[in-house]
Image (cartoon, rainbow, N blue to C red):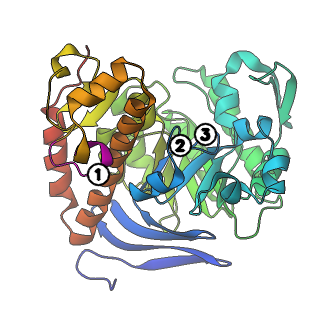
Amino acid sequence: MAPGPGRVSFSWEVATVSFRVDATDGAARAGVLVTAHGEIQTPAFMPVGTKATVKSLHPDEVRALGAQVILGNSYHLHFRPSEAVVESLGGIHTFSGWTGPILTDSGGYQVFSLRDTIRSLDDGGVTFRSVYDGSDARFTPESVAEIQRRLGSDIAMCLDVCLPSGAPRQELENAVRLTALWAERQVRAPRAPGQLRFGIAQGGIDAGLRRRSLDEICALPFDGFALGGLAVGEEKEEMLDCVEWATPLLPAERPRYFMGIGDPVGILEVVARGIDMFDCVLPTRTARTGSALTWEGRLNLRNARFRADAEPLDEGCRCPACERFSRAYIRHLVTQDEILGLRLLSLHNLWFVLDLTARARMAIERGTFSAFRQDALARLARSPEEES
């Protein structure tokens, strides 16, 4: 696409991969990230496939919904079945049957979200108990790089220290220090051919520490950068305020990743602030509770009012669930613990957030994102979340 009014174009090359921004509307960006397994059009929502699968869904189904890239979890794959097994079977793409791009996290979030399993934390790395068998394990920047190299993902995340909201400042300061120390080591570690590596800025909502982390991480030769340590319990307005001023401090010519957001309002808000990529378990986890994301709000299909409701989950939705089945039928499946019910809700919820993200991209390209966002937020605001 040739640059036009309101459009910019630039690129940053790394070996055989590149990232470019084709259009902007305010801070919102529409770009393309080229990886070893294909292009990712941004903004991009990444469905979470923790154990090399998006729960209950066939890879072709996920692709048909519009997903371009999925996320795998290094922590869980390291313990079950192990990176050695995955490597021996041709790498994570062959192993999982997903032929498109895959991002793997470092496992750091899992370690630090399970803080009671940590044995020790030092400059070298972190020692913790496995959630599978309680045995001692240790992650270092080098070992995490090696796990992801052997998995063969397209994008590998650096090991960081992610603390919950409200952590004491001394702990937060140490997290920023260790994240930078580890990033300097991991950026020098071997990686798979064509594998991109993203650095992560920490610091919570503390402006001073966040700026320090951004300065330290962005000074390193990463292929992309992420905002970590947000959406971990702080107030949403505090989080968005941080994204507002922190995102412009990330290199404009490289992809920007917000770790862990997937609600419709959150997606619109981070895209508006210049974020290119984001992931979250919310769409599929919400589905497994029996709830659907819709323009009418979050619908709890266990509610008796849907018992004889002949309408689709969301009027006008073209997902496999809405094209063929009624709310009443899906409620029947859910209340009877039929697996198909949770599968249909997973398909629908992923469609909802992927379609919203794709529409956001089209609006950026047309220069109408601001109006699109305002209209979408107004519709969502009229649809309070159902609680029973």
The local secondary structure at tag 2 comes to loop
Q: Nearer the viewer, residue 82 or 3?
A: 82
Work out whether residue 291 can be spotted. Answer: yes
User: Mark 3, residues whose alpha carbon is within 10 Å: few (<14), some, or many (≥20)?
Assistant: some
- Provide the secondary structure element on which disc 1 rests: helix
Q: Residue at x 77, y 60 (%)?
A: 90
Answer whether residue 318 is magenta in the image.
yes
- Which of the labelled discs sits on residue 166, or is there none? none
- Residue beneath label 2, please? 54
Q: Which residues are magenta?
A: 315-322
Furthest-bottom residue in this view: 2
Quadrant for the C terminus in the image: top left
Q: What's the CA distance linking mark 1 and mark 3?
A: 23 Å
Label number found at residue 50: 3
- What number is the disc on residue 356? 1
Q: Earlier in the sequence, mark 1 or mark 3?
A: 3
- Amino acid type, callout 2: Val
